[in-house]
Amino acid sequence: MKKQFDLHIYISDINHLLNLEETLRIIPKPEQEFIEIFDENVLSNQASLTLLRDYMYKYYGLQYEGNIEGIYFGQETCENLIPPVKLIEKAVEYCSEKEYLFSFATPYVSPKGMEKLRKIFAFLNENAPDSEVVINDFGVLHLLNTEFTNLKPVLGRLLIKVKRDPRYSLSGFEIANIEIKNLKHIKANQAEALQGSTLELHVYQEFLKEKGIERIGIDALTQGINLKTIKKWNFPVDIYWPWTYITSGRNCMIAAHTQPGKKLHPTDESCNFQCKKFEFTFQSDKQMLPSVARGNAIWMNTRSLHMEYFQSGFSRLIYEPYVPV
């Protein structure tokens, strides 16, 4: 059976990329003493890889290890984490040797971050002109359109405006059903509203195409997605799984926790990359999917929704071994 989607791997750490075989290795039946010391990143990677392996083998008779088409490398939420050009060179060289398509993920940025990206784009434009650039800032898209036309822009998931809540799939939502007729229709309409996005707007689609966008990225969301809705978008679709973006901001509460005197810690020169060292986890009075805060962003884990999304009609699966920070 023909493979439904191309498999790409999204990695934000150069060491995980250069040791990709180890990053994507399933540990066979680890002892309990090892499981107890695994953090959520490692546990998620192991569980998700197992789901991916079983799905690809059952439905396509393929091994995931030998069917990787490309690498997404970079950072989506924090300009302080934009890798220097020398690491981009290493990533491009690795992808060239392995014959992987290279896609560079970029965040929303300040003027300082824009200058960092300009140096990287200059390198890619000359040395890897077929590279894709994942755009999460329309200013960055303008920079590509005006200065680096050899590169291919891809609309990033942060620019897809949808509801993002780790509680939807498990807790559902309530409807005041007093004197309401056709309750089933109301539920269906509410679900459709939660699954909708700006991508249904024809004028927005035309705007993106005028700017050179030929594909888009979306998250695996708890409220699900409608196949008919995907078809209305008129773009090839990337699905990011299992780590789904919820929200982020200019302030970094992870850094603020270690530097309480600064209260709300801006993502400025004094950043000590605390996001690389630890994370916050969340609890709720409602059932919810596992969620963590890393740096200035919050993420939820949607690996339990794999079957719903693996068969949803997209063209690429962007597998994230770890939270992309």
Image: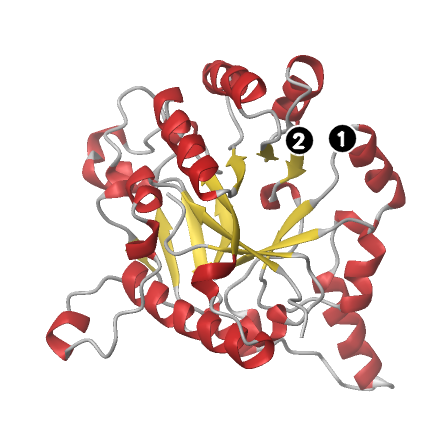
Q: Are marks 2 and 1 in contact (CB under 8 Å)?
A: yes
Label at residue 41: none
Q: Is residue 301 visible?
A: no
In the picture, which quadrant includes the N terminus?
Answer: bottom right
Q: Is residue 53 above or below residue 157?
A: below
Q: Please indicate whether residue 63 sits to the left or right of residue 25 in the image.
A: right
Horizontal and vertical percent position of residue 138: 66, 28
Report the front residue among 70 and 289: 70
Residue at the image point whose x is 33% and y is 55% from the top? 21
Mark 2 surroundings: few (<14), some (14-19) or many (≥20) residues within 10 A: many
Q: Which residue is mark 1?
A: 212
Horizontal and vertical percent position of residue 248: 47, 42
Report the front residue among 184 and 144: 144
Horizontal and vertical percent position of residue 68: 50, 55
Residue placed furthest toward the left: 33
Label at residue 152: 2
Q: Is residue 230 above or below residue 199?
A: below
Q: Is residue 189 above or below residue 219?
A: below
Name the colour scheme. Answer: secondary structure
